[in-house]
Image (cartoon, grey):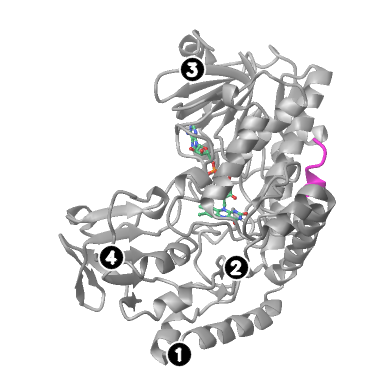
Amino acid sequence: MNEVLIIGSGFAGLCMAIRLRKAGIESFTILERADDIGGTWRDNQYPGCACDVQSHLYSYSFEPNAAWSRAFAEQPEILGYLRRCAQKYGLLRHIRFGQEVRNARFDERQHLWCVETAGGNAYRARIVVSGMGALSNPAYPDIDGLSDFAGAKFHSAKWDHDLELAGKRVAVIGSGASAIQFVPQIVPLVARLDLYQRTAPWILPKPDRPIGSAEQAIYGALPLTQKLMRWAFYWLLETRMLAFTEPALMRPVASYARRYLRRSVQDPALRAKLLPGYTVGCKRVLISNDYYPALTSPNVEIITEGIREIRGGSILDRGGREREVDVIIFATGFKVQELVPRGMFFGSRGRDLADAWREGPEAYKGTTVTGFPNLFLLLGPNTGLGHSSVIFMIESQVAYVMDALRQMRSNGWSALEVHADAQAAFNRELEAKSADAVWKSGCRSWYLTESGRNTTMWPDFTFRFRHLTRRFDSKAYRTEAAQTLASPGCAQQDERCGALR
Ligand SMILES: Cc1cc2nc3c(=O)[nH]c(=O)nc-3n(C[C@H](O)[C@H](O)[C@H](O)COP(=O)(O)OP(=O)(O)OC[C@H]3O[C@@H](n4cnc5c(N)ncnc54)[C@H](O)[C@@H]3O)c2cc1C
């Protein structure tokens, strides 16, 4: 039996595992549904895929990489970095690939999680740490006739590298963070590119640059210089939070973005289509130097009317115009509101986390949920960022989990469950902080639930989150030793979990 079971081997799961090993804890297993580590950076292999936070900051604080070749590294380099980390910290022998967690049930009598995989394996652990990722399940649009389309179609997170795009008529549905990265890469290849845009994103120039070997050598020889860079980027990005919480401060950013659009796109009709009609920051602010120029190419058309129907070999827009197309690429993002699928986690009294979250995902400090003892969610509700690196949030949460583990060990606790009122109070505060935030300034985005609640974004400075998670605050928790809770209903599940690893 494991002390800790980690789900997922992206930045979050690997960070948890590294911290466990650094603390000398070997009793853990990572269950990964794919056959490689890397999460986001394994799955998103579309052309031009890169991070949009400077790599000096978008990496683990304890594992600086002097060899980043660009200010904003591209996907292969980030995946390589994660692979090196997994290797260096001896994580591979702890990972079970091809193990898709189907469900996990908490045994209230023994204070253990029983985790079952799609392949029929079962694992038992005192603690489950979910690093399943908020952006790991692609979302597809619900469009009439989609299944009738006879040509090729794929999601940007599942790029079809075997498909030759050269000379094809390609439709891209969506104009968000992924589209703005791959569209400029494929425009020179394709015969025609129809970009179906529901909402124009705000775009700023990307302060990208290659990092030469001399600069890399300096970072390698004098690690303090790289630390200083990281520190400088952290504080530079952190100041942006001021504008996210006070939308009036976004006005100069909007002027700058408008100027950038004017400079990049001469055609007033095209410019009008590309000018967003909502406050900057309400949706993710994107950075790119080549997206606008790519859209001015004569083989690109931007369609803003919406899609009425997809047919065997064409797309009919809501204006009644039909365009023939060979390939459809979905740049439609991820199932963010479905942070945890229904039927995944069953906590006390067999309650499904999806039922506890009927009104939208909610947690204490983005990490623990009342009714779900010994479960920790990395990048759980309200830990997303629009202004900085989520690796900072992951590291904060992992420190919190590590302290929880330490306290469990030293106090002999076998179960921890956050009090409902602590969680409610925390979320009331989040809600109050979110009230004036820019995400609530009127646009529709994946940051908000249908009812307009912010369940995704951290509405404060990240150093405040770091402060809140620096220690495990056991007072907010019910702590217990094994065998003290009644356990209706867990006997059946023990049957299944009988032959456990
Ligand atoms: C294209 C792209 C670019 C991004 N760029 C940035 C950026 O510049 N800055 C930033 O801060 N953030 C960025 N993000 C957000 C990014 O997702 C996070 O930064 C980070 O990679 C999340 O790591 P994670 O480990 O939490 O999740 P993931 O990387 O998604 O990893 C989750 C892992 O869990 C596995 N998993 C999921 N469900 C199961 C299951 N049931 N059983 C077993 N395994 C499972 C998945 O296979 C995956 O390996 C970007 C996201 C995308 C999609």
Question: Could you tell me which residue is drawn at 71 percent across and 54 percent down?
Answer: 216
Q: Is mark 4 within 8 Å of ligand 1?
A: no
Residue assigned mark 1: 266
The answer to which of 380 and 176 lies nearer the viewer is 176
Name the residue type under label 1.
Answer: Gln
> Does residue 140 appear to the left or right of 365 in the view shown?
left
The secondary structure type at the circle numbered 1 is loop
Q: Is mark 1 within 8 Å of ligand 1?
A: no
Name the residue type under label 4.
Answer: Val
Q: Is residue 94 magenta?
A: no
From the image, which quarter does the C terminus lie in? top right
Q: Is residue 228 above or below residue 294?
A: above
Question: Could you tell me which residue is drawn at 47 percent across and 63 percent down?
Answer: 181
Q: Which mark is residue 122?
A: 3
User: Residue 473's quadrant in the figure?
Assistant: top right
Question: Could you tell me which residue is drawn at 20 percent across and 77 percent down?
Answer: 320
Instruction: Select label 4 or label 3 by which is in front.
Output: 4
The secondary structure type at the circle numbered 3 is strand
User: Residue 156's quadrant in the figure?
Assistant: bottom left
Q: Earlier in the sequence, mark 2 or mark 3?
A: 3
Q: Which mark is residue 170?
A: 4
